[in-house]
Amino acid sequence: MTHSGDGHSETTSAIPRNERSTPPPPPPPLPPKARPKAAIPPAPPLPSTSGPAIRNSDFLRVMSAASSTEPQQSASPERLFQPCYMFFYGSLMDPEVLQSILELPELPIIRHGSVTGFSVKMWGIYPALVRNGSETVSGTVWKATSESQFLRLAAYETSVYTWCECDIRLSDSEVLHHCRTFCWAGDPCSQELEEGSFDLERYQRYFKSSVTRGRTT
């Protein structure tokens, strides 16, 4: 029993000193957080099976012209059309493409030749003939016998090309005068044109069917 200063007595329980001063134990630590899973990398792209992509959207204009069956009106009605030899250096070198565009009943007979004073640049997947003083371009030759045939060819080439006169040297060295071919209608230094050459086999492998499908038998 203890005595207080005011004369009252106070009873205390006998609690060991070390127990009264010891704090309660801390709560157990939380379990460690799970480590974040590593991000799963995306699957690699599938390999392409459809051939090279077509970079130039004007390809659609060419395909639209190819599917058209109505030739355009002559731009110069006062000039009577005369049958002429045509020089081709791109997709029209393929006889089946030429037959399809002109809806010919039989496969056309073509010859091989070249023109001088021109060079080739690339407009997307298509070649463009530009004037150059000394270079020679090889291609094929076919004779257009009617104005409707010529206008169909012009529609297929679209307005980015214009026809120009040329002389063609055949493979047997014969020279044909006053022939026609389709040249680039714009600035030959245009940024739309790139250096390069036309690969006919590549065109036939990847793009030819867009023109000839359902047209030839």
Image (cartoon, rainbow, N blue to C red):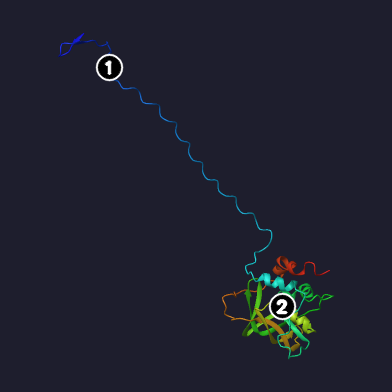
* Quadrant location, the C terminus: bottom right
Three-letter amino acid code at the position of disc 2 = Ala
Q: Is residue 56 left or right of residue 207?
A: left
Three-letter amino acid code at the position of disc 1 = Asn
Q: Which mark is residue 160?
A: none
Q: Who comes first in sequence, dot 2 or dot 1?
A: 1
Q: Residues within 10 Å of mark 1 (few under 14, many from 20)?
A: few
Of residue 192 and residue 115, the one placed in the foreground of this image is 192
Residue under the point 73% across and 67% down: 210
Q: Secondary structure at mark 1?
A: helix
Residue under the point 28% across and 17% down: 20
Whole-percent x, y for residue 80 in the image: 76, 90
Residue under the point 63% across and 85% down: 134
Of residue 159 and residue 1, the one placed in the foreground of this image is 1
User: Which image quadrant is residue 101 in?
Assistant: bottom right
User: Which image quadrant is residue 21 in?
Assistant: top left
Of residue 52 and residue 12, the one placed in the foreground of this image is 12
Q: Residues within 10 Å of mark 2 (few under 14, many from 20)?
A: many
- Name the residue beneath numbered marker 1: 18
Residue under the point 76% across and 73% down: 97
* Quadrant location, the N terminus: top left
User: Which image quadrant is residue 155 in?
Assistant: bottom right
- Name the residue beneath numbered marker 2: 155
Whole-percent x, y for residue 99 in the image: 79, 75
Whole-percent x, y for residue 175 in the image: 74, 88
State the count of labels. Answer: 2
CA–CA distance in space, label 2 to label 1: 107 Å
Q: Are marks 2 and 1 in contact (CB under 8 Å)?
A: no
* Above/below status of 38 relative to 30: below
Give the residue furthest to the top. Answer: 1
Of residue 153 and residue 110, the one placed in the foreground of this image is 153
Q: Secondary structure at mark 2?
A: helix
